[in-house]
Amino acid sequence: KNEVEQSPQNLTAQEGEFITINCSYSVGISALHWLQQHPGGGIVSLFMLSSGKKKHGRLIATINIQEKHSSLHITASHPRDSAVYICAVRSETSGSRLTFGEGTQLTVNP
Amino acid sequence: DTEVTQTPKHLVMGMTNKKSLKCEQHMGHRAMYWYKQKAKKPPELMFVYSYEKLSINESVPSRFSPECPNSSLLNLHLHALQPEDSALYLCASSQNALVGGGIGTGELFFGEGSRLTVL
């Protein structure tokens, strides 16, 4: 079992839909990152969380430390949101090392 | 300036060539990273520099040689690569790096990557 599990692996939505991507992890963490990667491109850091909830534009990220679970929500989805979304955790003992989930491929159709 | 700039964007090289990938940031970050990413896979950490000193080498073959000439620049020197080394090489930076534990190292800023093809 991977230390970081994301679901779903693939997600197709219609423009305007509310989207949720989930991330579960099995270790104690100091921080959790949500990252976005467009095809063939670099990675953009969306959020870094250690507790609670953060919001940026149409994106919301939440984390429940007790349940070892985080969610990334996209409201009013748009085709430009189509990308791979990656959850990555920094464990309490790993220092600079991130453990990455396998990513969620999101496709938003017009 | 919140950018990490990588050059070149694309590189094709033969197995006997010597080439370098470059990475630059002007955010005052003291930790810089090299990651390797194969298609449809998450990034794999290769090297971490902290305060211009190599702090993590994830058992990377010696045909990859990192260099951090100053706090803004990170190079990856490539020599005698194999076709299986073809991948997207990503540079990242963060405010600082804590090796071996700690309360966290801050948000990571990634470059656009250098896509390497080894023939």
Image: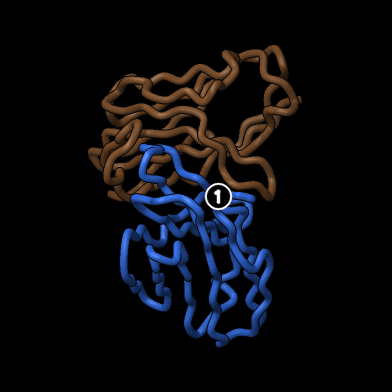
Chain colours: A blue, B brown
- The image shows residue A27 at horizontal and vertical percentages of 46, 50
Q: Secondary structure at mark 1?
A: loop
B91 in relation to A15, above or below: above
Image quadrant holding the C terminus of chain A, namely: bottom right
Residue displayed at 61% across by 37% down: B10
Residue displayed at 51% across by 27% down: B21
- B16 or A98: nearer the eye? A98
- Residue at the far left: name it: B28
Q: Is residue A62 left or right of residue B78?
A: left
Q: Quadrant of residue B86?
A: top right
- The image shows residue B41 at horizontal and vertical percentages of 65, 47
A39 in relation to B10, above or below: below
- The image shows residue B110 at horizontal and vertical percentages of 43, 46
Residue displayed at 51% across by 35% down: B45
- The image shows residue A81 at horizontal and vertical percentages of 54, 71
Q: Amino acid at mark 1?
A: Glu
Answer few, some or many: residues within 10 Å of disc 1's Cα (few below 14, many 20 plus, some between 14 and 19): some
Residue highlighted by disc 1: A3
* Chain at numbered mark 1: A
A106 in relation to A92, above or below: below
Q: How many marks?
A: 1
